[in-house]
Amino acid sequence: MPEESPTGKHGTVPESACLTYKSRKAGISLSVSGAGPPAMTAVLEAQGLSRSFGKVEAVRSVSFSVDEGALFGLLGPNGSGKTTMIKMLTGQIRPTSGSSRVLGLDPAADPIGVRGRIGIIPEQETPPSFLTAEEYLHFVGEVRQISGIEAKAERWFQFLEFEEKRDVLCKDLSRGTRQKLMLAQAFLHDPVLALIDEPLINFDPIMQQKVKDFLAGYVKKGNTLFLCTHILEIAEEICSDVAILNRGDLLHVGKTAEILRDGKHLPAFFLEKVGRASHA
Amino acid sequence: MLELFRAMMKEEYRLHSTLFGSLSFTLFPVMICAIAFMGTFLIPLLRIAAPSQDIGLSVHAMFLLMGIMVGAFGLLGKEVMNRRFGQASLLSYSARTLPLGDRFIFLNFVCKDTLYYFLLWVFPFCLGFAIASPFVGIPVATPFLLLLTTTLAFLTGLAWVFFLSSAYSRSKKILIGTFLALIAIWALVFFGIGVNLGLYFPPLMLFHAFSLPLLAACLILIAVPFTIAIFLFTNEFGESEKHYVSRISPLTKRLSMFPYPPLAAKDLLDIFRSGAAIGQTIFSFLLPLGIIWFFLSVLGTTVPQGDNLLFFAMTTGIISSTMYTWLTEFDTYGAYACLPLGVPDVISSKVTSFSVMQVIPAVFLACVGVLSGSAGTLIPALAVWCGIAFYTLAVTVYLTGLSPSVLVYSAKTLISYGLLVGPVLLIVTALAMANPWYAAAALLLLAPAWWILRAGKQRWATRDQPVF
């Protein structure tokens, strides 16, 4: 990121990140401090999370925790339940059983509180069709009550190199540009935790590298990142911790370094785990 | 041809059955059949109040409107697909990935819509009527004739809206020109020589007096616009990038009196930039209401003169409530799911925008009242419209949340809607017939509307949003 990064200072939650639109309008102030607890405190915990859609069990009794400052990669093949996990953790859907805590809040009980504090990039980029790219960032700024939104949006346009698309309707943007927009909206309010689903998939290699560097820098500043992906090379490169999900079952949770220390690469490790589970 | 047609039929069925559940959707035609069956037993009672001709007129008008509504999807179909289904694509938009021409696909789309909605709406209705008709002394041939003429009425609506949609895809000027020409012809005939063209609606005339020349006229009335629609059809909706100056922040400041100013500003931009402000107002509001007024004025023998405006106000109230659907068509809740906004926040914002948009029906109703010489009952008519519009809106929100346009096909939803709205309409009708000013009591509906709306917001706050 450029010198004046859109990301907040190390360990600090800007006020804008803490409150929902209504509570700010009503003048209610919440005292959430991102500086808070020392390292190795879990900022995200899942306990026996399960979710069924009719007869299909998308996620089966998944438990793990993500420490503050981690870049946690949730890996899995298509249809493994990654998106369902991220939706449960961000309060978009409720678990069938089990519970979770995100920054100390229960997403099922207080989804708006959770979404007020975190950044989210959904699996499918869904900026509103009839707002321009710039208007969408300003809209997010208005909803999240972010001060100095014009300057922040401008920095994101420059950083992700899509200034010339700022006045184009979102429906007319390419997938890559829409993804840039969704990336910008997720970090616009300087969240201490971001949950992002396949954030690099539509980018060219140069932009992928730029965004990877940004994500690594974001975590270095003490923030936490929960990344869903099936691009294993990227996960190996940037994730400090990985979990492997397959057909709704959690097959592995641990440090990436531990896998590499055994002389293995993440893709081989992943294929071994998933292959073994598929044959079981 | 047949493979694509079969695939489109399957696609339409799977789309609906996925959205509403297989059982619920399969029950939908059964329910239509049951309603027609039970309704047929009321015909002897209805004949006391209304001549058979008026009943026939109402049925044909209903199927004409149905055809218009089904066809109207073509107008904004592409946009709706983009907004609601995101990455998903339907066969009708697959011309670029298959070695098939746009017009060929559109022809299949037209045939599919014709058969699909015939099986979904027209056939079950006529079947219910046919089963019950021997019990009420209706001649055996009548249900068969009704099946033919209601199909023709449905196809007439479908054909003309397809034609207008295709014209729109080529040029908005052609669309507006055609639309204005149709209104001018109707106005000239109605006001100039005092003839109600509704009485000369060919499928209705065919129902009353079957003849082969009349049947040919009906077919021409359908075939000509269909053919022109297929000829005019283009899949290129001017997809060039449009550039706009940023308006959201200034609008948000101007709308600061609204409960959710950024959402209100977004609604406003959605409505104007999508073309819905003009397109939806014409096709989903003015056109159906124009046709209803047209047929209502023909039903002069049934509805006491002077009270037409009150019944029209009731209809306007129901159709006004569908403006909520316009506001929810632009995006799914997914667009808000990464923001600290709950479903009740979004519903509240849409309801506020809906309230502002009620200026359109209010002005429209006032104009109709004055122009038709019914200014004397305008105040109770406005009260009726207002009460019904907000009550039906509240029921819609309670039953469908942020997805009214897709959940409407659920049999359970439709039955619940009928049970919640039907008795209220009967009461207001009874009041209107007793004394026009009694009908003004419809304003009291605002109280239950507020309560139902609140319950609806709570209901949808605790549910996962449907994914389409």
Image: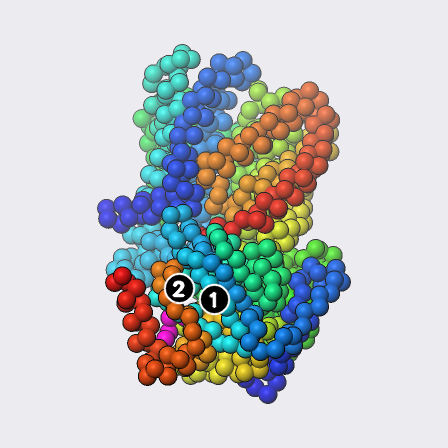
Which residue is rendered at x = 68% and y = 23% of the image?
B431
Which residue is rendered at x = 57% and y = 49% of the image?
B462
Q: Amino acid at mark 1?
A: Phe
Q: Establish whether labels 2 and 1 are both on one chain.
A: yes
Q: Earlier in the sequence, mark 2 or mark 1?
A: 1
Judging depth in this view, the residue of B234 and B131 nearest the camera is B131
The quarter of the image holding the N terminus of chain A is: bottom right
**Could you say where residue B28 lies in the image, as x and y percent from the top left?**
42, 34
B315 in relation to A221, above or below = above
**SS type, badge 1:** strand
Please say if the residues under marks 2 and 1 sit with CB atoms less than 8 Å apart: yes
B293 in relation to A120, above or below = above
* Few, some or many residues within 10 Å of mark 1 (<14, 14–19, 20+): some
Q: Which residue is mark 1?
A: A64
Q: Which residue is mark 2?
A: A250
**Could you say where residue B199 lies in the image, as x and y percent from the top left?**
48, 27
How far apart in space, not on screen, are marks 2 and 1 (Cα)? 9 Å
Specify the farthest residue to the left: B2
Q: Amino acid at mark 2?
A: Leu
Find the magenta span and give its range.
A229-233
Subunit that carries the residue with mark 1: A
